[in-house]
Image (cartoon, helix red, strand yellow):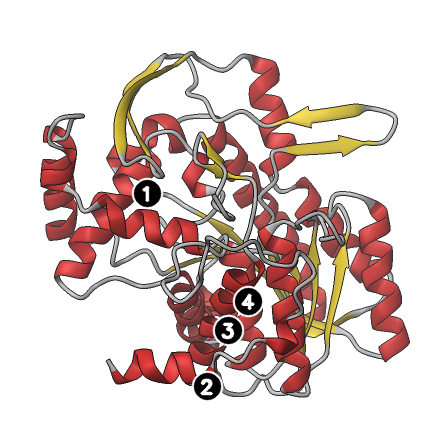
Amino acid sequence: MGYQPRIKNNICTNAHPVGCYYNVYQQVQQASDQTLQGLQGKTALVVGASSGIGLASRIALTFSAGMDTLGVYYDRAAQAHKYGNAGWYNNQAFEYYARRANKMALSCNQDAFQRNAKDWVIQKLQQSEKQIDVLVYSLASPKRSIKGVGDYISAIKPINQTFQGQTLDVYKGEVRDIEIPSATHDEVDATVKVMGGEDWQAWVTQLKKAGVLAPNFKTIAYSYLGPDQTQQIYGDGTLGCAKAHLHETCVALDQSLSSMGGQARIGLLQALVTPSSSVIPSLPLYIAALHQEQRHVNKFESTLQQVTRLFDEKLFNEVQSKTNLRLRVDDLERDVEIQKKVTAILNQVNANNLHDLIDVSALKQDFLQQFGFAYDFIDYGLKPDPLTPPAIQDFSQLLGMKKAG
């Protein structure tokens, strides 16, 4: 059997070290080909930096903008006879490439909700005599523990109605019907507690109190609006309540930062293939159709391209950033003609015609590669060393061959 992905309910519980390193390497090379002006030597903090949008943000800030970074993530580290999570391997690779580029790359593998993680960041900033110019809040967690209170578990459910629809098993490439009952009041409150803006505000407040925020400091948290077909399970559900709280928090933070010339903003991205989005019911099917139609008309952007455009055209564009609390780069998703085609597909698709209407193999590959799988140069019939270091992997020739066609 070798070393194959272990997947249940669109959650991958293992990772291949070499594949994860290559995933990061590719993004580093792509980011190095882009330049974000006026940010060289500044310092950024990314909370939720291990994978998906947070990882792409940290790569863009380091290799496109030339910034030093600190990252907070919470993943299982590899041991001699035990594999780590994808986020842990991603972080090892990121640190290796960042330091080779002579950039500070400090990482904290702790629960970002806890005070210890915030204290660690403050201590490292004080020791290095640096201040934070940009804080990216990209935390996606299913649980939040509060000392003396208990655990809050988020729930992805509709509100005041039962959701009936279809979802996609990404690994098996199968459509199945789902029914999700309405959330209870406690589930709504818990989801807001985990995925709302309370912890984002706590990070900014504690960093500000410690005096480690630079003048004209900017902070951004990511959100999603989406079209009509995602609203019942997203915008009108528990996730929508959490995002509404995040937006309300943004307004309060922006006001509190105004005295130091600071800003708080919401970044509205399009639907992307990430470990987090893959577990939202019905969303993988929608994303598969969306990305297929975007690729057909050359309007597809990777996660790295999305965040790079957000930084370049919105967050660090003084005109855009000053006049808009919500910075939108979801315009390609909202394209009217693309949405018409996606809607037509979703209205027809079922278990029998799925592969006639949607090339789900593209989504499966995008999903698996985030965990180091589905790369044709890796022999998955062999088990890798859990502690394989990124330094022994030379991907330069491989990437050159891919560019050559």
Give the SS element for disc 1. loop
Point out the frontmost of discs 2 and 1: 2
Q: Are marks 3 and 1 in contact (CB under 8 Å)?
A: no
- Location of residue 276 in the rendering, given as x and y in whole percent from the top left corner: 49, 42
Q: Nearer the viewer, mark 4 or mark 2?
A: 4
**Amino acid tagged 3:** Tyr
Q: Residue at x 80, y 32 (%)?
A: 146
Give the CA separation, mark 3 to mark 1. 30 Å
- Give the mark nearest the N terminus, 3 or 1: 3
Tell which of 358 and 5 is nearer to you: 5
Can you identify the residue that label 3 sits on?
Answer: 25
State which tag comes first along the sequence, 2 or 3. Answer: 3
In depth, the one of 367 and 200 nearer the eye is 367
Q: Position of residue 275 (x, y in %)?
A: 48, 45
Q: Dot 2: within a 10 Å radius of its alpha carbon, few (fewer than 14), some, or many (20 or more) residues?
A: some
**In the image: residue 161, left or right of residue 380:** left
Q: Is residue 381 visible?
A: yes
- Give the amino acid type for the residue marked by disc 2 in the picture: Thr
Query: Element type at marker 3?
Result: helix
Corner quadrant of residue 392: bottom right
Q: Which mark is residue 21?
A: 4
**Tag shown at residue 226:** 1
Horizontal and vertical percent position of residue 215: 71, 75
Q: CA distance from mark 4 to mark 1?
A: 31 Å
Task: Locate residue 92 relative to residue 178 in the image: left or right.
Answer: right
